[in-house]
Image (tube, rainbow, N blue to C red):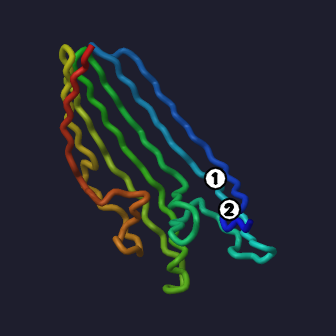
Amino acid sequence: IKALFVNGPKTETDGVDIFVKYEDAYADGMMAVGVEAAYVIDYSVAAYSKGGVEVAGAYECAGYFNINNTCRSMPDLKAKAFLNYTTDSHNLYGAVNYISSYIDRRAGGLLGRQVEIAPHTTVDATYTYSWDDFSMSFSAYNLTDEQPPFTLWEMSYDPNTHSPLGRYFKVGFTYNME
């Protein structure tokens, strides 16, 4: 029997995930403020050998576009700061989202240098009104209508990390059956 499928090379990762939230009574409701973040310190893939022959060299994924290897795009930092205010019938939520810059290594040979994909920040907001078993929400995402950073890729942005939609709105309805 000849097995043509094998596991990939050794991968070592290090990172920090953080979630901090403070909540307290405010006016007639509850106010919450917080931050969540994921920071990739290291994501190293060892060289890959098959039958004693090196098929692919070792590489680092953290901080790179990674479109030409086995890793996904991996900015070092993704973070969100949020504020939420809730009363009996009303809920107002806002968030600032941040993705750090990262490097596209592919352009090195073409342009003689590595190309930085710019950092990206968006702002989101949601208002929800609830009564009895119903709730209705109105959301606006990417309020400032930020375009995704330019990337030397077929769609001119990184679809694994950013959204091309710009500002968009959503209306939601919920009915709880008990």
98 or 159, which lies in front?
159
Locate residue 130, reporting x and y percent: 21, 20
Locate residue 146, reporting x and y percent: 29, 57
112 or 130, which lies in front?
130
At 55% across and 85% down in the image, what residue appears? 109
Decide: is 5 above or below 168. below
Three-letter residue code for mark 1: Ile
In screen coordinates, is 174 left or right of 13?
Answer: left
Three-letter residue code for mark 2: Gly
Decide: is 120 above or below 135. below
Question: Which-is-in-front pick, marks 1 and 2?
Answer: 2
16 or 173, which lies in front?
173
Which image quadrant: the C terminus? Answer: top left
**Residue extending furthest toward the right:** 52
Q: Which residue is mark 2?
A: 8
Locate residue 21, reporting x and y percent: 47, 28
Per the image, label 1 sits on a secondary structure element best described as strand
In screen coordinates, is 151 left or right of 15?
Answer: left
Decide: is 87 above or below 59. above
Q: Which residue is mark 1?
A: 41
Question: Dividing the picture into quarters, in which one does residue 12 lie?
Answer: bottom right
Per the image, label 2 sits on a secondary structure element best described as loop
The disc at residue 155 is none
